[in-house]
Amino acid sequence: MTEPESGKLRAARLWRDLALRSRKLRGEGGGGALCQLFPDAGKEEDKGAEVADLALPPDLSDVQVLNLDDRALEKLPAALAGRQLENLRALILRRNRLLSLPAAALPRCRLLELDLGHNRLQALPEALAPLQGLRRLCLGHNRLHELPCQLGALRLLEELELSFNRLAALPDSLGLLSRLRALDLDHNKLPAFPRPLLQLSALEELDLSGNRLGALPDDIGALRGLKLLWLSGAGLLELPESLRQLGCLESLMLDNNGLAALPVQFGQLQRLKMLNLSSNAFQEFPHAVLELQGLEELYLSRNRLFTVPEAISGLSRLLTLWLDNNRIRYLPDSIVDLEGLEELVLQGNQIAILPDNFGKLSKVSIWKIKDNPLIQPPYEVCMKGIPYIAAYQKELAQSQPAVKPRLKLVLMGLKDAGKTALRQCLTSGQQKVHLVQGSKGVEVTNWTADVERNLTFIVYDLAGDQSYDVIKPFFLSPGALYTLVVNLKAYVSKHFYPYVGYFLNFIRAKVPHAVVCIVGTHSDLCDDKELEEKCLDIHHQIALQEKKNSDILQDLAQKIDEALGQDYDVRASSPHAAFYGVNDKNLRRRKAQLQYLLNSRLQILSPVLCVSCLEYSNIQRLRDKLMSVAEHREIFPNLHRVLPKSWQMLEELHFKPQELWLTWWDSARLGLQAGLTEDRLQSALSYLHESGKLLYFEDNLTLKEYVFHNLTKLIDILNVFFQKDATILLQKLLSDTNMDELRATQLHHYVEGFLLHGLLPAHIIRLLLKPHIKTLEDLQLILELLEKMGLCYCINKPKSKPLNGAAAWHKFPCYVKNEVPHAEAWINGTSPAGQSLVTEQLQIDYSFPFIFPPGLFARFSVQINSHVVHRSDGKFQIFAYRGKVPVVVSYRPASSRLLQLDTLSIASHASLPNIWTAWQAITPLLEELNVLLQEWPGLYYTVHVLCSKCLKRGSPNPHTFPGELLSQPRPEGVAEIMCPKNGSERVNVALVYPPTPTVISPCSKKCAAEKHRKW
């Protein structure tokens, strides 16, 4: 299933392109010769040539179509001027640099088609006057401010394309074009509907999109022959009743206006097949639409609809129905009678339950339902498609369903915030609790909050120590209630970010739309005034941080809109331009990502809940608050989902095995016992993951083959390596009372080396995990798991059985403390000896304005190990080789959150003729990083290619090219790009574009973002 292109004009573009493709020159003479100058093989060399150098074939007498498209022409070849070409019928001059077109420059011929689109014309060429026989004239994407009256002399004109110019008025003589069938005035500056158009009785296609018309004339009915009318973004607030007179109309685009109702007799447009009413102000479904019996496509996205009428089933020919981003709470049962539907888009509504018999919509191939609070069927089932919904509904109808209200509760906060004490008080149910100070790491506890309703919280207490940062993200998932614990006694306003802001950015980056409750602890140590001031300050600073983040994203989205408003040729012509060289596809993808981030706001519950573990009444109020939030159906609609019998059985079966974890195939066998086929198992596992019962990472390529049903054992294993406490580690190693002093000293050295360099031999790891390891195979499985999680790697993995019992050593990058100065010198453009490098440098920077994902550098360090050799690791740098080519990975933390960004760089170098080897070296590393970043769907980051010339000069602020260029082919005919930081220097295109484009843009987060939705 392909994700449809996002953007407000998506449907409009599809139809417009379809219509444009269908247009054909209905001129004299079919067939004939076509002259395509400069085939692709020689195009790059010829593109920059002087016009005088262009060679024309000696004999053009039989040529009917002469194509000079995309030749960087500033004037026509002199050889064409005045030449007698009696058979020439079409002259294509698109995508050049023409400022004018004198009559003398044209050959003598009887042209039927002239295409001057995508040039730089500021006035209509004088050469048009003699071309009385023109049938098709294309002048789109120029700089025309006005049209001459002489245009009306082209009486045989059938198609006129004037889109993306600067026209504010049209001449009256335009009304004389009595044969005109298609007129495109898309995106000009027309302030009102041009009256001359009403005289064009033969007009069939009219595009006035992107002009702020304000209204349509009452006599619009004069254009009775119209079949396609496009009025997207025309500033319309209402439609005239006379619109009903356009009885031939088949396609009507009215999106991006301010319409709240349709004319009473709108239903008389019985030939209408496509209607786009997206991005308007409809609060009620327009009932006039229900009278359009022949309608095949209906778009009502981004309105304010609350309901869909039962009568929609009367639109029996409907193939496409888009109702996304409204306020629809339920669908009528009759919608399943639209059995011909092929596209059904419902995302971004408030739909909790789908009608029964949804499987009748079996022809639907484009199906979008994300960002809905789905209960029945569960979200995991709905996302897999209509056949899975049908199977789920069938099973539910045949089994005894059950409700298990269960919610994952995640406690987060700084060390000493009071998370562990709070968890103990919440879960004990007693007035006096013996508090155990400090945390043992990550801990999971079941808390039955309400016995009568069987309401259960699965409480994840995430340790506040930073040494656990690399594993914390594994325990964050959609559908949980996040409780941010703040020590109010220690909190001061200037430290808002480490106490609160950091964690909010953390949660938002990992779990967009998450629900967050802020709990202030140690309230007994603060007086009432202090509590009030600190709570108000926290909320005030949260609002400021949210606004700042939103402003940054909105500002960038606006810049992208401005760039999209430009022609691509403008962006590609100057490195000074914003988003230099980035194509429209990548810009729209980036805009969609920004829009997703803007819509992914955290649901932060107010006010701050102040508690003290010494006051039972405070704890009871917090319990009541958490239960109230959990049972709020608009916040957590999935809490009361009805589970089919097979899902209940699957849960029971998964908690019988005693293994450390199950493989996917083990889980699949249990699924078959429960009556779940393999393709339906994933939905049930996703539900169990998000409810907190187990861990199943379906979006992680390396971990999705595991199902972690035994959370206690898994967490025990992880806690061993991330406690960062020498005493605890030694206690585990020195548990043997018969150990001699020499052996004890060796173990001390191993612990010191681990905490300083992150190194441990396999036999010491076995001792640390003694309760969980019975065989050597158990040890190998655990080490393999830790490597796949990105926590450690083997630095001397033997290809066969090691000789003389040599130990395999494993490195945990998050513990590395030493620096690697020679790598830093290399990346700044000098060799370790201090001599300037004569090679060319490649450097790709990933910048993170809001937050650098915790543990990312350490996990990335592990993931690249299979791609590099001879590596030397530092705390924030890795110096290694890919074959014989050096690579450097560097992380530069922001020195100040206001002045600098966290940046992760991947760099290499080679001589210019061999620069492909440097690209070959860093590309696998870029791919590994992009995969890791897909796990952070709410994370905003940017990617840039640094200017090689600036790096060689040692510039402290090198110029950066957009990272989207990595996914685009090298531009044809361009050998060098000017560096805007120094206009006299030019950068070889091979230092900016890779030899082969990457599969996707590094800024794209399409896959992971689709998995997350509003709860």
Image: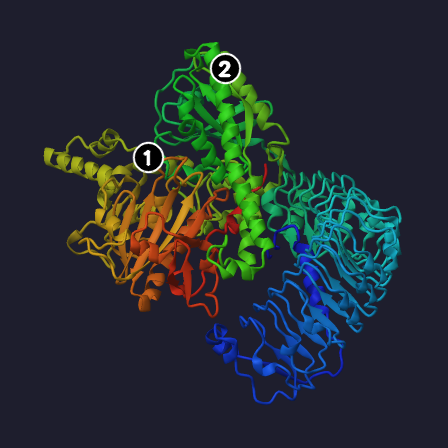
**Residue 238 at x, y percent in the picture:** 81, 45
- Tell me the residue at 71%/38% (across/down): 329
Question: Which quarter of the figure has residue 812?
Answer: top left
Residue pictured at 22% horizontal, 55% vertical: 831
Residue 623 is left or right of residue 928, and the answer is right
Relative horizontal placement of residue 172, taking residue 428 as reference (left or right): right
Residue 29 x/y as whole percent: 74, 83
Dot placed on the residue nearer the N-terminal end, 2 or 1: 1
**SS label for mark 1:** helix
Residue 976 in the image: state x and y as whole percent: 41, 65
Q: Residue furthest top?
A: 527
Tag 2: amino acid: Glu
Q: Would residue 807 be seen by someone viewing this image from the given angle?
A: yes
Q: Which one is in front, 258 or 737?
A: 258
Numbered-mark total: 2
Image quadrant containing the C terminus: top right
Residue highlighted by disc 1: 467
Residue 649 as seen in the image, left or right of residue 217: left
Residue bearing mark 2: 532
Q: Name above or below for residue 728 compared with residue 283.
A: above
| Dot 2 crowding, Cα within 10 Å, few <14, some 14–19, many 20+ | few
Task: Please report contact status of discs 2 and 1: CB closer than 8 Å, yes or no.
Answer: no
Does residue 791 appear anywhere in the picture? Answer: no
Say what amino acid the circle numbered 1 marks: Ser
Relative to residue 764, is residue 452 depicted above or below?
above
